[in-house]
Amino acid sequence: QKLKTSSGSNLIKDLFEIELETQTWCIESLDEEPTYDTQRVLRLSLPIDKSCTTLHDSLANCLTGQLEKHSPTLNRTALYNQSMEVSHLPPYVMMQYMRFYWRTDTNKKAKICKNVHFPLVID
């Protein structure tokens, strides 16, 4: 059952939904135009890697990255850069640290035990 406000809007979306503007462009082909998209998520998944020591580092890593997908221009799988910008912040922002990853050498889940510092108030 969906929670509704008195005006009829969805309460969960009003309180937690983050809107992201995404730009994706092909690294291997300059002829291909970048694509723009809008995503709506309820939480930000923050990766932890070797360079990540603070919440701000994790946020920067979360909003940029590379992916592989099919390129219509090259007619094969190609590398793409992706950058996201927050276009709407809700009153409450959920952030999840991604502390587990899949180790391909042992075929098991592993935990990242690195300390990551975060402030109690984010401005």
Image (cartoon, grey):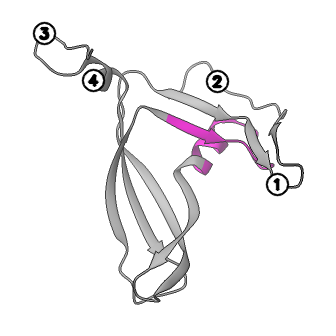
Closer to us: 61 or 118: 61
Query: What's the CA distance linking mark 1 and mark 2?
Result: 33 Å
Q: Looking at the image, is 74 positioned above or below residue 18?
A: below
Q: Which residue is drawn at 85% across and 32% down?
A: 113
Residue 5, image x and y in percent?
Answer: 18, 12
- Residue under label 1, please give it: 104
Residue 69, image x and y in percent?
Answer: 51, 71
Q: Give the range drawn in magenta.
A: 44-61
- Residue 123 lies in the magenta stretch: no
Q: Which amino acid does label 1 sit on?
A: Thr
Q: Looking at the image, is 53 positioned above or below residue 84?
A: above
Secondary-structure class at tag 2: loop
Mark 1 or mark 2: whose residue is earlier in sequence: 1
Mark 1 or mark 3: whose residue is earlier in sequence: 3
Whether residues under marks 3 and 2 lie with C-beta atoms below 8 angstroms apart, the answer is no
Secondary-structure class at tag 3: loop
Secondary-structure class at tag 4: helix
- Residue 59 lies in the magenta stretch: yes
Mark 2 or mark 4: whose residue is earlier in sequence: 4
Mark number for residue 6?
3
Query: What's the CA distance linking mark 4 and mark 1?
Result: 40 Å
Mark 3 or mark 2: whose residue is earlier in sequence: 3
Q: Which amino acid does label 3 sit on?
A: Ser
- Residue under label 2, please give it: 119
**95 horizontally vs 105: left or right:** left
Q: Looking at the image, is 43 positioned above or below residue 105?
A: above
Q: What residue type is labelled 4?
A: Asp
Residue 100, image x and y in percent?
Answer: 74, 37
Q: Which residue is drawn at 58% across and 59% down?
A: 65
User: Hey, which quadrant is residue 31 in on the image?
Assistant: bottom left
